[in-house]
Amino acid sequence: MENSEVRVEGKEEKEKLPPPELGQEYHNVTILATGIKGDGIFKTPAGFVIIVAGAKRGDAVSIIVRRVFEKYAFAELIKE
């Protein structure tokens, strides 16, 4: 008998991005896009998506993380 390899093809498991901590602040960040509901979208240096209420694409803002989920988080603007 010959030795043969068996390959299973399918979805590759993506590496999980480290989420921000609840209450974590990011200062002077640029909003990259505006989501379909009008909220701003920011990505952490590690690539984790944070949705920012009241921000629009191109805004330079400071934010605080208020809710964290497995794939994204919600943040609020910090009033300066």
Image: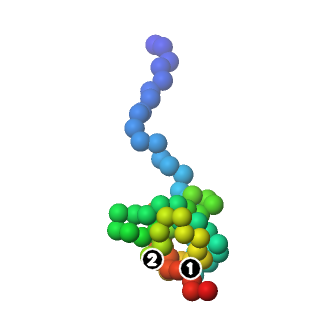
Callout 1 amino acid:
Ile
- Of the 4 image quadrants, the one containing the C terminus is bottom right
Query: Does dot 2 land on a helix, a strand or a loop?
Result: loop
Measured as percent of width and height from the top left, residue 35 is found at 40, 63
Q: Is residue 37 above or below residue 65?
A: above
Measured as percent of width and height from the top left, residue 54 is found at 45, 77
Callout 2 amino acid:
Gly
- Which one is nearer the viewer's eye here, 12 or 46? 46
Q: Which residue is mark 2?
A: 54
Q: Can residue 31 be seen by looking at this rendering?
A: yes
Q: Can residue 19 be seen by looking at this rendering?
A: no
Residue 72, label in figure? none
Q: Residues within 10 Å of mark 2 (few under 14, many from 20)?
A: few
Q: Residue furthest top?
A: 1
- Direction from residue 70 to residue 21 in the image, left or right: right
- Direction from residue 38 to residue 63 in the image, left or right: right
Query: Does dot 1 land on a helix, a strand or a loop?
Result: strand
The residue sitting at 47% across, 61% down in the picture is: 33
Residue 19 appears in which quarter of the rendering?
bottom right
The residue sitting at 47% across, 20% down in the picture is: 4
Measured as percent of width and height from the top left, residue 30 is found at 58, 66
Q: Which residue is mark 1?
A: 64
Q: Is residue 25 above or below residue 19?
A: below
- Which one is nearer the viewer's eye here, 25 or 19? 25
First of labels 2, 1 by sequence position: 2
